[in-house]
């Protein structure tokens, strides 16, 4: 994916055959063969999983609605360790420099040793952290349900700066060229200086912005609850184009192969020309899609609330295979392979809401 992002993410684990990892509300994390959709293993948490997994250091890190962050062996599906927080872990973890960063509904951002699961530091916000953290330039950026975007020192957990929006933040921030981009329920996408917290610009959509933005080739792509996918100039915030779907956009866009892949609550996954905003194809599932797609080796993978994970041909949208879980799939897939693209990240080492 062409991107100027400076987001710090860990290297993905190398495997003999690529596996796709995806979580479901049936309490399970599944490892599937990317070619056939065959299940290799599954891991059962104590309750449902909404967090998206991340692959690093031979392990899968994922949060659960049972208040835990789990570390699972990527090859076998065996639990390595678990860390208990004080609330549900909707937030997807981020791994950098041997540390796992994850937010919890207890209002805390945790820094945890990636190898043994020991607590390094904790930063406390007044309300829950649904937003997933992003690490760049020695800082951790995370949005909170108390309306603030926080920049926290990645080593010490000390607050560097905070930026207040008009209402709560569910969107996960990204960092590109020294700028943090994040959405808010106040209907705006903000561009904020990463070093100082000073606002560069704000763009107003027609609905709350739950989705996380993606930056590619000087353009910011972001979905809104008004059902539109927007393409904005990353430097100025001016609109390039907008593409209208038929329902709310909770999933984050993915840019690959000159296309933007966007899932919608109208049941469809869309492939949209990144330059023009014209639809290339759409694929209909049987229910809403909250899951953010992942793209690799000519295929797009996405989960749906119809309980299925789909593998599609990236240029045509033709179905390659589908795998049925036991409940809705709102978690975004992740693939243990270096050339995969998910959300705003240049590799597959992190999930995004």
Image (cartoon, grey):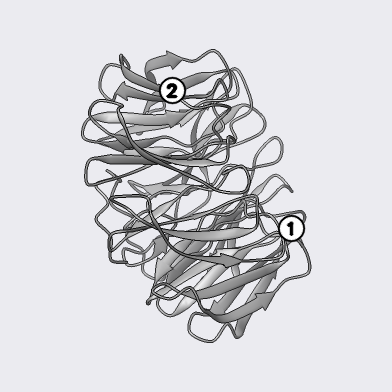
Observer able to see residue 36? no
Q: Earlier in the sequence, mark 2 or mark 1?
A: 2
| Residue 25 screen position, x and y as percent | 72, 47
Q: Quadrant of the N terminus?
A: bottom left
**Residue visible at 38% across and 65% down?**
340
For label 1, the residue is 305
| Label 2, residues with CA under 10 Å away: few <14, some 14-19, many ≥20 | many
| 59 relative to 107, above or below | below
| Label 1, residues with CA under 10 Å away: few <14, some 14-19, many ≥20 | many
**Residue visible at 58% across and 72% down?**
270
| 71 relative to 1, above or below | above
For label 2, the residue is 110
Residue in front for this viewpoint, 86 or 253: 253
**Residue visible at 54% across and 32% down?**
169
Marks 2/1: CA distance? 29 Å
Q: At numbered mark 2, what does the secondary structure look like: helix, strand or loop?
A: strand
Residue in front for this viewpoint, 352 or 272: 272
| Residue 73 screen position, x and y as percent | 45, 47
**154 left or right, relative to 162:** left
| 29 relative to 228, above or below | above
Residue in front for this viewpoint, 35 or 329: 329
Query: Which mark identifies residue 124?
Result: none
**33 left or right, relative to 269:** left
């Amino acid at each position: 994916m062409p991107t100027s992002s400076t987001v710090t993410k860990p290297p993905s684990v190398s495997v003999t055959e690529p596996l796709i990892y995806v979580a479901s509300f049936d309490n399970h994390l599944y490892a599937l063969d990317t070619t056939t959709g065959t299940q290799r293993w599954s891991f059962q948490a104590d309750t449902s999983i909404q967090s998206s997994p991340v692959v690093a250091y031979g392990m899968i890190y994922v949060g659960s609605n049972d208040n835990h962050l789990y570390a699972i062996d990527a090859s076998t599906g065996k639990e390595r360790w678990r860390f208990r927080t004080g609330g549900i872990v909707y937030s997807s973890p981020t791994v950098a420099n041997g540390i796992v960063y994850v937010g919890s509904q207890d209002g805390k951002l945790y820094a945890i040793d990636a190898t043994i699961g020991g607590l390094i530091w904790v930063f406390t916000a007044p309300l829950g952290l649904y937003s997933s953290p992003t690490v760049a330039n020695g800082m951790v950026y995370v949005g909170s349900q108390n309306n603030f975007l926080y920049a926290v020192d990645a080593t010490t957990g000390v607050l560097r700066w905070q930026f207040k929006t008009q209402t709560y933040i569910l969107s996960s921030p990204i960092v590109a060229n020294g700028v943090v981009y994040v959405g808010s329920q106040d209907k705006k996408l903000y561009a904020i200086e990463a070093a100082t917290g000073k606002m560069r610009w704000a763009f107003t959509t027609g609905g709350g912005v739950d989705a996380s933005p993606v930056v590619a080739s000087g353009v910011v792509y972001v979905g809104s609850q008004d059902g539109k996918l927007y393409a904005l100039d990353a430097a100025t915030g001016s609109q390039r184009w907008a593409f209208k779907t038929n329902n709310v956009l909770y999933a984050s866009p993915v840019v690959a192969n000159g296309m933007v892949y966007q899932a919608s609550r109208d049941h469809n996954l869309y492939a949209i020309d990144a330059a023009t905003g014209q639809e290339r194809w759409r694929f209909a599932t049987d229910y809403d899609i909250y899951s953010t797609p992942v793209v690799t080796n000519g295929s797009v993978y996405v989960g749906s609330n119809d309980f299925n994970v789909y593998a599609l041909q990236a240029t045509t949208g033709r179905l390659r295979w589908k795998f049925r879980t036991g409940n809705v799939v709102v978690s975004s897939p992740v693939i243990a392979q270096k050339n995969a693209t998910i959300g705003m990240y240049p590799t597959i080492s992190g999930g995004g809401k």
